[in-house]
Image (cartoon, rainbow, N blue to C red):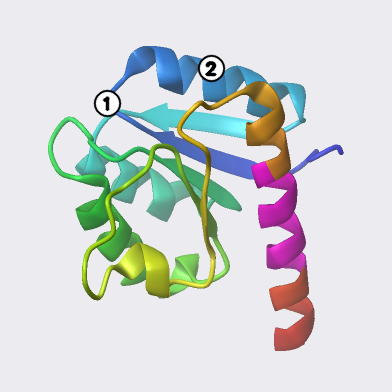
Amino acid sequence: MSADGHRALVVDADGQTRSFCRGVLEELGFSVRDVDSGVAAVVAAREMVPDVILLGAQLRDVSGREALVWFDANPALHMTQILILNAWPPMDGDIAQKRRSTIALPDALSALALRRGVETALQRRSAAKRLEG
């Protein structure tokens, strides 16, 4: 799968996780930006309007859930697919479960699992665009 021309935003407090994800995404042809905080993620998402966002459970300033609420409130990101990097314990009314464009990746993240998740995200995004016409 080649993702030439696609944009990705990686958001996680852990630098190693961001670096790993950036490497895999760049190998797939993505233009990648990575940040460690929710505030920086919101700013970056507004500037670049990514095709996919890889979102960690805990960021430097807020939880991943809070950042997800911010992303969900931005109409420009309604087609953006969000991949959850680490398992989030389910909560009642959890936005990550309600949002149709959210994909949970396995806890033991591998390059293969990340590639598959991104491929699924791009397929979902393409299908949603076709439906919107």
> Is residue 32 in view from this perspective?
yes
Q: Which residue position is annotated with label 1?
A: 13
Classify mark 2: residues with Cα within 10 Å, few (<14), some (14-19) or many (20+): some
Which residue shows up at 67% across the image and 44% down it? 118
> In the rendering, which numbered label is found on residue 87?
none
Tell me where residue 95 appears, x and y as whole percent: 32, 69
- The single residue placed furthest to the right in the displayed view is 1
Q: Quadrant of residue 85?
A: top left
The residue stretch that appears in magenta: 117-126
Q: Is residue 123 above or below residue 36?
A: below
Q: In which quarter of the image is the N terminus?
A: top right
Which amino acid type is marked by label 2? Phe
Q: Crowdedness of circle 1 by 10 Å Cα count: few (<14), some, many (20+)?
A: many
Rendered position, 126 above or below 36: below
Q: Which of disc 2 and disc 1 is earlier in sequence?
A: 1
Residue 42 rendering spot, x and y as whole percentages:
31, 50
Residue furthest left in the image: 61
User: Residue 132: x percent and y percent?
Assistant: 70, 86
Residue 110: x percent and y percent? 61, 23
Which quadrant would residue 116 be assigned to in this image? top right
Residue identifier under label 2: 20
Magenta highlight on residue 125: yes
Q: Compared with residue 117, is residue 13 higher up or lower down, i.e. above or below? A: above
Quick check: can you spot residue 74? Answer: no
Residue at image position (66%, 55%) is 121
In this view, the residue in front, 74 or 54, is: 54
Instruction: Provide the secondary structure element on which disc 1 rests.
Output: loop
Q: Depth check: 45 or 58 in front?
A: 58
Please check the rendered image and state whether residue 98 is part of the magenta-colored stretch, yes or no: no
Q: Is residue 78 above or below residue 8?
A: below
Q: Which amino acid does label 1 sit on?
A: Ala
Q: Could you tell me which residue is drawn at 79 percent across and 79 percent down?
A: 130
